[in-house]
Amino acid sequence: MAMRGWPLIKLLPQVTNFRFVRLAKFTALISVVLCVASLVGVFTPGLNMGIDFRGGATMEVIQPEGRKLDLEAIREGVEGLDIGEVGVQEAGAPELAMVRFQIPEGRQQAAVVTQIQEAVTAAAGPVRFSAPSIVGSKVSGELFSKGLWALASAIGLMFLYIWFRFEPQFGFGAVAGLLHDVILCFGLIVVMKLEFNLNMVAAILTVIGYSMNDTVVVFDRLRENLRKYKSKPLKEVIDLSINETLSRTIITGLTAVMVLAALAFYGGPALFGFSVILMFGIVVGTYSSIYVGAPIILLWGVKRGGSTDDAKPIKLGMASRP
């Protein structure tokens, strides 16, 4: 006999009637406090810059017999060295690994390289090493500035997309939500002392894409309901639109978070920070679609109907005149 309620997804309510807008002032205060705290943390104590943005050296480790390298043993072997941060990750094949490290001030490059090679050999057995490749401070500075430009460009392009698809106030609401998500992601990086590298830039760009996708779903339903319910107060239309898309949002978010949780648990140190930022970004992206973008539309007001001739702006939830 088939079990009722299986799959568990059927247990989710089909219709919800939560009043999201009434909490908008409270959640706005929380968002402002968290964003300010995150911005302060970015400057003091600051981001834990990785070798990509701080400069350093990379060296390839090769197992000549084709056996798989024990990356955990190598990481444990180099962690005890007094040379600062050392990163170890697979380089495209089980028998290849990439070691990334910094040259401490006052230390000779050759001496540091020799120290790392001895530690890796003791942990992994006889291996070969490629010549170290140096990433200078100028190159790392350019990578950092280009990474920030990539984030800013993504937010700007998203704003233009929403502007042309909907109305200007929708665009400002979406951009406010994206900025909120990005700033809080930086705050989590500071709090957890995660290494800020190119992987983190890729994670934040992914968060921007996910957050925008979720926002577009809510805004699209809101636009449809504004045309359908021309005399209903705006705050009620916003609540209705969010409730109608809530099950889709929860299912999509939970599915992604479960996959990323497995990636964080089994992916090792190289993917841990990337996975954590994506999980956090999905949560705050869903939150911002409800409590950042929508309240801005409520304050700004929107136009009703299919044309602008007979449409009236709606302010603070006041109903339009039919």
Image (spheres, helix red, strand yellow):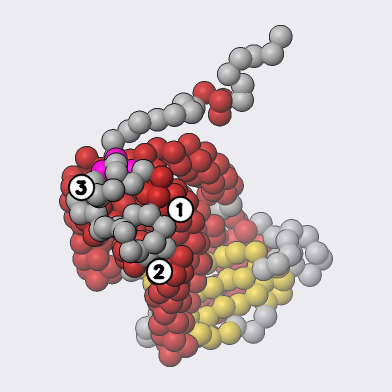
Using the rendered image of the protein, determine whether residue 30 is visible from the camera's viewpoint: no
- Extent of the magenta region: 233-237
**The quadrant where residue 233 appears:** top left
Give me the residue at 32% from left, 33% from top.
18
The image's mark for residue 220 is: 1
Q: Earlier in the sequence, mark 1 or mark 2?
A: 2
In space, the residues marked 1 and 3 are separated at their CA atoms by 21 Å
Left or right: residue 220 compared with residue 229? right
In the structure shown, which secondary structural element does the residue marked by tag 3 occupy? loop
In space, the residues marked 1 and 2 are separated at their CA atoms by 13 Å
Residue in front for this viewpoint, 251 or 298? 298
Indicate the position of residue 197 as horizontal and vertical percent values. Answer: 46, 70
Query: What is the magenta segment's predominant secondary structure?
Result: helix
Label 3 sits on residue: 318
Question: Which of the image's four quarters has the N terminus?
Answer: top right
Type of the residue with mark 3: Met
Label 2 sits on residue: 163
Left or right: residue 301 compared with residue 90? left
Residue in front for this viewpoint, 104 or 291? 291
In the structure shown, which secondary structural element does the residue marked by tag 2 occupy? helix
Does 289 appear above or below 115?
above
Left or right: residue 89 compared with residue 25? right
Give me the residue at 54% from left, 60% from top.
270
Left or right: residue 258 compared with residue 123? left
